[in-house]
Image (spheres, helix red, strand yellow):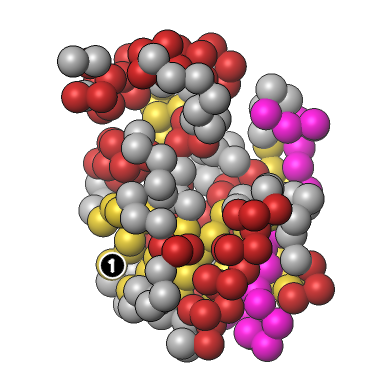
Amino acid sequence: MNNLITDPTSFIIANTRLRPVPLVPEISLHVADEAVPLWSKTEEELGQAGLPPPFWAFAWAGGQALARYVLDHPDCVAGRNVIDLASGSGLVAIAAMKAGARRVLAADVDAFAGAAIALNAAANNVAVATTAADLLAGDEAPMAQTVLAGDIFYEHGTAARALAFLERMQAAGALVLIGDPGRSYLPKARLTEFAHYRVPVTRELEDSEIKHTVVWGLRGVEAVGD
């Protein structure tokens, strides 16, 4: 049986390095030096082509901004049950736990994200629950007082489903915070700007070394912790 399938943790450790996040140096993540080689190696190890990029192996701009906001405004998560949607590396989930969240559920459908989140949470001395369930497909919203979503509006279908989910969570009483560097399908007309950041990123993944990135809330939500 393929080693990656049975032991994704070993694969992640072998192909990443633990490094501080540029905008959030309080947190360190197992990150890859280059995206394309890791992406290719993942496909080769699994014997599959056309896999999604290894989102779990990088600190994306939206997640960095959202993590920074959460650490600087802990009232938005302190004592709350929190969902980190499309968690990837777990950066935002880890920030929420460090800011005093009661419990964080890091949700990501990528099979390797769960292993990456567990590794990164342990490296930062916090405990984060994970799920590979597609929360966007559920009719009933999980219980949470805060929902965090970093860099999820990059593709049309995903963006539409994510917005519908976030609106359902807001209607159920949750505070919704979104970190985004201006992705193509960001629904700006539905959002209110809370904070903005200049986020260091790699040009291999982005079109510049600094991404102007905003933390947003759905309209009608006031910023917490200001």
Position of 46 with respect to 149 (left or right) is left
- In this rendering, the answer to whether 31 lies above or below 174 is above
- Image location (x, y in percent) of residue 115: 29, 36
Depth check: give the residue in front, 34 or 37.
37
Depth check: give the residue in front, 127 or 138.
138
What's the residue at 68%, 48% (across, down)?
154
- Image location (x, y in percent) of residue 41: 45, 12
Disc 1: which residue? 103
Q: Quadrant of the C terminus?
A: bottom right
- For badge 1, the amino acid type reads Arg
What's the residue at 18%, 15% (across, down)?
1
Task: Give the quadrant of residue 223.
Answer: bottom right
Say what secondary structure mark 1 lies in. strand
- Image location (x, y in percent) of residue 48: 43, 19
- Image location (x, y in percent) of residue 38: 49, 17
Alpha-carbon neighbours of circle 1 within 10 Å: few (<14), some, or many (≥20)?
many
Q: Is residue 149 visible?
A: yes
Depth check: give the residue in front, 166 or 46.
46
Q: Does the magenta stretch include residue 218?
A: yes
**Magenta-highlighted residues:** 205-226
Q: Is residue 93 visible?
A: no
- In this rendering, the answer to whether 166 lies above or below 116 is below
- In this rendering, the answer to whether 190 lies above or below 220 is above
Q: Does the magenta stretch include residue 52?
A: no
